[in-house]
Amino acid sequence: MTQAPDPSAPLPGAAATEPDAPLAATEALLCFNLYAASHAFIRLYAPYLERLSLTYPQFLVLLLLHEKDGQGVGEIGRALSMETNTLSPLLKRMQGAGLLDRVRSQADERRVEIRLTEVGRTRATEAAEVPGCIARDGGMTEERYHQSLATLRALRREIAETEARAQSRVEGDQR
C-alpha cells in the first residue's frame, strides 16, 4: 500500500526551503496550489490522451457524453464549467474529427443535441479507461483518492457559494 506524501515536504519543481522557513508568496496561496495542481494533472493525462488524439477538454466532453449522450451545449457547459464561447469551437473541432454530431431534437426542433458518432463512442470507451491507468501508474490509494475528491468537491461548493454571495453584494451595491 502506498503512503501519502508528507504535505510539508517540498513539491517537485519548487525551491527547497528550510523546515521553518515561510512559504514563498505563491506557495502560500490556495488558488495558486489549485492552479498548479490542475496543470500537473493535465500534464499527467497528456501521454494517455495523445495516444487517443484528444486534448484534455475533448476528453472531458467524451466522458460526459459517454455517460449521457444527446446533451445540449448548455448542459455540457454547465457540467464542465465551460463558457459557450469556449465550448462551441471545441465541439466544432470534435465534430470535424468525426467524434460527434449535432442533431436536432425530435421532441423540440429548437434544441440541438450533441451525440457521439460510432468513432466517438469507441474513443469514449477507450478514454474512460484513462483515469484507472493513471491511478494504477500513480500509486494513489483508493482511500486517498476518495479523500482528495471529497475535499475538492467541498471546496468547489464553498467557492461557488462565496461567488454567489459576492455577486449578490455587487448587485446590491449597484442599486
Image (tube, rainbow, N blue to C red):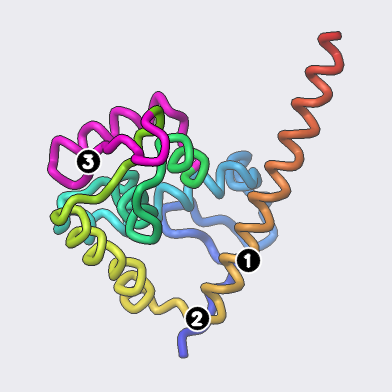
Dot 1: what SS?
Answer: helix
Disc 3: which residue: 101
Mark 3 or mark 2, which is nearer the start of the sequence? Answer: 3
Disc 1: which residue: 150
Q: Is residue 82 magenta?
A: yes
Q: Marks 1 and 2: CB-CB under 8 Å?
A: no
Q: Is residue 58 magenta?
A: no
Q: How many marks?
A: 3
Horizontal side of residue 40 vs 171, given as left or right: left
Disc 2: which residue: 142
Horizontal side of residue 136 vs 175, given as left or right: left
**Disc number lying in front (2 or 3):** 3
Residue 39 disc label: none
Dot 3: what SS?
Answer: strand
Label 1 to label 2: alpha-carbon separation: 12 Å
Q: What residue range appears in magenta?
A: 81-109
